[in-house]
């Protein structure tokens, strides 16, 4: 797995970890960059990130599962102030040859990966939209690739849930 690859270059390891963090949380790069310790809140004994999208100002919240929490802990000693990750000012530069621009695109892909995975594994689109901090559900629908196997699964789940709740139809006379 990507998490087990040992990288000699600490910058590449950091970029990989930010990608994985984005893949497990769906948080945009700029919002990862802005995260502080104050954004971590305990809800029912579990850590959650509660913040607002810089792009839209829309609030979002996501439970920190084990892998992203390990990444938060891994970079605790490297923090600058109370920011969760010490991502430098160079992250704002977007010249085509800039490594940070490539890493920003990389993390943008991780956000999309999270959304597609969440939808594929049955998370309701309304929840995915809220977690991503979208202002409109039509933005989230871009990720909703409805395949015939997904349709078959969804119909089977629906069918199993309604069995026994509907009246039995009479036969032909």
Image (tube, rainbow, N blue to C red):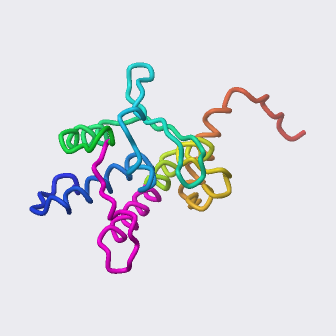
Question: From the viewer's perspective, is 37 left or right of 28?
Answer: left
143 left or right of 135 in image: left
- Please name the residue shown 20% across and 42% down the image: 74
Considering every residue shown, the one lying at the far bottom of the view is 97
Q: Judge whether residue 9 can be spotted in this image.
A: yes
In the picture, the quarter occupied by the C terminus is top right
Query: Predominant secondary structure in magenta?
Result: helix
Rendering coords of residue 45 (x, y %): 38, 20
Q: Quadrant of residue 28?
A: bottom left
Provide residue 93's location: percent of width, then percent of height.
Answer: 38, 69
Vertical position of residue 60 compared to residue 97: above or below = above
Q: Nearer the viewer, residue 106 or 171?
A: 106
Q: Nearer the viewer, residue 92 or 118?
A: 92
Give above or below for 146 relative to 69: below
Q: Which residue is at 40% across, 67% downward?
A: 105
Judge whether residue 124 can be spotted in this image.
no
Nearest the viewer among 91 and 104 is: 91
The stretch of residues the image draws in magenta is: 84-113
Q: Where 26 falls versus 104 (above or below)?
A: above
Q: Quadrant of the N terminus?
A: bottom left
Q: Position of residue 158 (x, y in %)?
A: 64, 40
Q: Position of residue 120 (x, y in %)?
A: 50, 52
């Amino acid at each position: 797995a990507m998490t087990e690859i040992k990288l000699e270059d600490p910058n590449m390891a950091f970029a990989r970890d930010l990608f994985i963090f984005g893949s497990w949380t769906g948080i945009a790069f700029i919002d990862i960059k802005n995260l502080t310790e104050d954004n971590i809140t305990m809800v029912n004994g579990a850590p959650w990130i509660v913040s607002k999208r810089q792009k839209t100002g829309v609030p979002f919240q996501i439970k920190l599962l084990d892998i992203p929490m390990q990444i938060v802990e891994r970079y605790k000693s490297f923090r600058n102030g109370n920011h969760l990750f010490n991502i430098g000012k160079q992250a704002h530069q977007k010249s085509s040859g800039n490594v940070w621009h490539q890493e920003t695109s990389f993390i943008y892909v991780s956000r999309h990966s999270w959304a597609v995975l969440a939808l594929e594994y049955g998370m309701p689109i309304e929840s995915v939209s809220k977690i991503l901090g979208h202002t409109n559900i039509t933005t989230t629908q871009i990720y909703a690739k409805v395949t015939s196997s997904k349709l078959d699964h969804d119909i089977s789940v629906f069918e199993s849930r309604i069995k026994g709740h509907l009246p039995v139809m009479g036969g032909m006379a």
